[in-house]
Amino acid sequence: MVWHATKVTRQDRERLLGQRGVVLWFTGLPSSGKSTLANEVAYMLHQRGHLAYILDGDNIRHGLNEDLGFSPEDREENIRRIGEVANLFADAGVIAITAFISPYRRDRDRVRRLVGEGRFIEVYMNCPVEVCERRDPKGLYTKAKKGEIPEFTGVSAPYEPPEDPEIELRTDRMSVEECAEKVVEYLEREKIIRPL
């Protein structure tokens, strides 16, 4: 198998779009605010004329990863696949925003190596499990505690927090808008998007 080079480079696509292609990797416990914040950041970027696309954990399991369960092996494959897809989006010059629990550090680190330093931005949604449990719109924590959902992160399966994320957000103390502004400020500071 041979990788085929193309005439149009990532840098060409980034110039066309007026932004750098990166992966914003939102990680955290269930109900820590990943999907909500991903949507807010994508909206803010769109309002500013930037192209972003959300790869959401629940949505991906309706198609690309519908064949996977929640065993440690399936979780690893889920993150491997989405890392490959997110990398393709970033190579296209798009700001790929992922919202996945991605509980294991080694899986997130593998995606970081794939995407490359400076293009993988780990966003840790730091929220105590008690707050996540109170927020839980689907009642999953309750079901997990009753044993109805095996391998549930934060209850019967582990979550390994990032050791050195690019962005850490206390979603129990900050509003969605405040969190989104912090992410956008980081993108400006790192010259991924142009400042207003």
Image (spheres, rainbow, N blue to C red):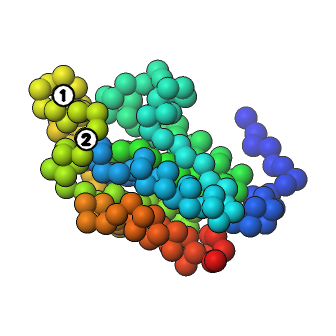
Residue type for callout 1: Lys
Image quarter hosting the N terminus: top right
Q: Position of residue 34 (x, y in %)?
A: 39, 50
Residue 191 locus on image (x, y percent): 62, 75
How crowded pointer 1 is (Cα within 10 Å; few <14, some 14-19, many 20+) is rated as few
Callout 2 crowding tier (Cα within 10 Å): few <14, some 14–19, many ≥20? some
- How much space separates mark 1 and mark 2, taking CA atoms? 11 Å
Q: Which residue is mark 1?
A: 143
- Please say if 102 is above or below 66: below
Query: Where is residue 95 shown, x and y percent of the image?
Result: 61, 56
Residue holding disc 2: 136
| Above or below 155: residue 106 | below
Residue closest to the far right: 7
Disc 1 element: helix
Residue appearing at x 64%, y 70% in the figure? 193
Q: Is residue 140 visible?
A: yes
Mark 2 element type: loop
* 134 in relation to 46, above or below: above
Residue drawn at x 30%, y 51% is: 32
Left or right side of 193 for 176: left
Mark 1–mark 2 CB contact (< 8 Å): no
53 is higher (above) or lower (below) than 68: below
Q: Earlier in the sequence, mark 1 or mark 2?
A: 2
Q: Is residue 103 left or right of residue 107?
A: left
Foreground mark, 1 or 2, reads: 2
Left or right: residue 2 versus residue 165 is right
Is residue 90 visible in this depiction of the protein? no
Q: Residue at x 55, y 46 (%)?
A: 54
Q: Quadrant of residue 2?
A: top right
Q: Quadrant of the C terminus?
A: bottom right
Q: Amino acid at mark 2?
A: Asp
What residue is at 28 percent from the left and 56 percent from the top? 161
